[in-house]
Image (cartoon, grey):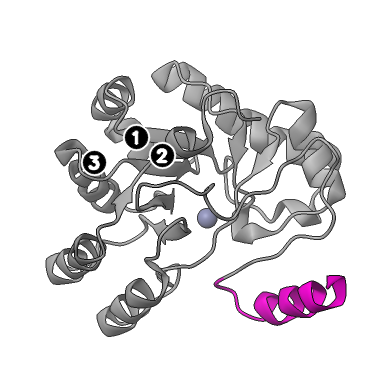
């Protein structure tokens, strides 16, 4: 049984679409999918923020209220200040959630404990100062890369939930619109945490198709806190 599972993990890890971690810090709870629920739901998580217009686009999807989004903020990007007022309001309305995605998107697994802390704390402080928002316990290590020291330093700060994913729109680098739709068709499934990025604006047609796929499957995006509950850590 365990061997079968191990084989599955190894084969799954060969796909960047489903990252796998080694043994977690005892205080950490690595998540890559949502708990079971009667509602058909997924978590649409959107990372980074290199493009202010892409951030604006996702915020406007959240405004409509059909899909609640979780944004993993890389705080060095100015987009997060440009849209500060709208973000604060959407947080208050419960339409979005924010997670810690470090200050400058360094691969934490290559850093010293001190530098890991600087990356996580800098983003944490930004979210507090800019929006009065505490993102704990959710953080996403850039590239999904982590190790026991990263998880230990993060857990010391209250970031006990390294948030991975089970499916990607594959658009962290340049991919064609057709490919994004293929990924959406493949990964938009009940209980999934799907990773997306706000680093370049997708075409209106691509976004419409993604929304159409979710709708045709009766899927609604919820925030991580909506799925896991307020006391999860
Ligand atoms: Zn990222």
Q: What residue is at 20 percent from the left and 38 percent from the top?
A: 65
Q: Quadrant of residue 185?
A: bottom left
Q: Quadrant of residue 69?
A: top left
Q: Which residue in the structure is indicated by mark 2?
A: 223
Magenta: predominant secondary structure element? helix
Q: Residue furthest front?
A: 38
Q: What residue is at 86 percent from the left and 45 percent from the top?
A: 149
Whole-angstrom CA distance, mark 1 to mark 3, is 7 Å
Q: Residues within 10 Å of mark 2 (few under 14, many from 20)?
A: many
Whole-angstrom CA distance, mark 2 to mark 1, is 7 Å
- As helix, strand or loop, the secondary structure at mark 3 comes to helix
Mark 3 vs mark 2: in front: 2
Quarter of the image where the N terminus is located: bottom right
Q: Quadrant of residue 88?
A: top left
Position of residue 28 measured from the top left corner of the image (x, y, whole percent): 76, 40
The residue range painted magenta reads 1-17
Q: Determine whether 218 is above or below 27 in the image.
A: below
Mark 2 vs 1: CB contact within 8 A: yes
Position of residue 176 measured from the top left corner of the image (x, y, whole percent): 30, 82
């Amino acid at each position: 049984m365990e061997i079968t599972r191990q084989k599955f993990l190894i084969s799954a890890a060969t796909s960047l679409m489903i990252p796998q971690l080694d043994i977690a810090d005892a205080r950490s709870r690595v998540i890559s999918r949502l708990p079971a629920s009667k509602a058909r739901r997924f978590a649409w998580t959107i990372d980074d923020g290199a493009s202010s217009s892409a951030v604006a686009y996702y915020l406007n999807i959240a405004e409509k209220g059909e899909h609640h989004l979780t944004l993993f903020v890389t705080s060095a990007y100015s987009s997060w200040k440009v849209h500060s007022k709208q973000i604060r309001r959407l947080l208050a309305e419960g339409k979005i959630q924010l997670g810690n995605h470090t200050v400058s998107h360094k691969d934490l697994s290559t850093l010293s404990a001190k530098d890991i802390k600087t990356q996580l704390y800098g983003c944490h402080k930004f979210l507090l100062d800019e929006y009065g928002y505490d993102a704990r316990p959710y953080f996403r290590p850039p590239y999904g890369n982590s190790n026991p020291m990263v998880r230990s330093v993060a857990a010391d700060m209250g970031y006990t939930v390294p948030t991975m994913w089970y499916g990607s729109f594959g658009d962290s680098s340049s991919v064609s619109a057709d490919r994004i739709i293929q990924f959406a068709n493949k990964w938009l499934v009940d209980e999934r945490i799907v990773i997306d990025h706000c680093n370049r604006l997708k075409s209106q047609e691509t976004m419409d198709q993604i929304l159409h796929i979710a709708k045709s499957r009766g899927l609604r995006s919820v925030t991580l806190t909506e799925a896991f509950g307020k006391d999860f850590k």
